[in-house]
Amino acid sequence: MPYTEFQSIVNKKEKILDIHSPQGTKVKCSHWTWGYKDDQEIAKKYLEKDKIYTVDRIEVFSSYSNLYLEEFYGIIFNAIMFEQV
């Protein structure tokens, strides 16, 4: 995601997931167009709109974070696409 797009997210105060959220945190995929094209395709394949999921773990890297959900063992989602509920 380009910095300018990220800055507009911050300015609009969009709800995003805290990447340091613990296991058990409830989330939903609210930002279907964020992330890379592959991330969007994975989300569309597995997730339902407005359904609540449970965080298994989050791996934080320098420019992105992988989100694992308890409901989908081994499937990696882009954390930027989620918000905490």
Image (cartoon, grey):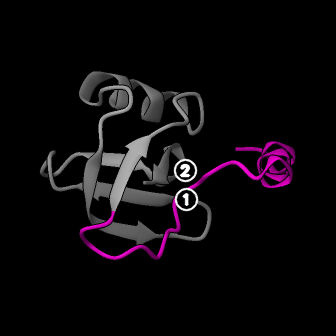
Q: Is residue 65 above or below residue 45?
A: below
Q: Is residue 10 above or below residue 29?
A: below
Whole-percent x, y for residue 58 in the image: 36, 67
Instruction: Identify the amino acid type marked 2.
Output: Ile
Number of numbered discs on residues: 2
Whole-percent x, y for residue 40 in the image: 46, 29
* Residue assigned mark 1: 64
Write down the region rendered in magenta.
1-25
**Mark 2 nearby-residue class (10 Å; few <14, some 14–19, many ≥20):** many
Q: Is residue 11 above or below residue 60?
A: above
Q: In this rendering, which labeled residue sits more in front, label 2 or label 1? A: 2
Residue at image location 82% in from the left, 51% down from the top: 3
Looking at the rendered image, the quarter that the C terminus falls into is: bottom left
Residue at image location 24% in from the left, 56% down from the top: 54
What is the magenta segment's predominant secondary structure? loop
Whole-percent x, y for residue 35 in the image: 57, 39
The earlier-in-sequence mark between 2 and 1 is 1
Closer to us: 85 or 64: 85
- Tags 2 and 1 touching, CB below 8 Å: yes
Check if residue 15 falls in the magenta segment. Answer: yes
Q: What SS does tag 2 mark?
A: helix
Separation of marks 2 and 1 at Cα, in angstroms:
8 Å
* Label number found at residue 80: 2
Q: Could you say which quadrant of the image residue 38 lies in?
A: top left
Q: What SS does tag 1 mark?
A: loop
**Mark 1 nearby-residue class (10 Å; few <14, some 14–19, many ≥20):** some
Q: Is residue 69 above or below residue 41?
A: below
Instruction: Identify the amino acid type marked 1.
Output: Tyr
Whole-percent x, y for residue 20 in the image: 46, 76
- Position of residue 45 in the picture relative to residue 41 (left or right): left
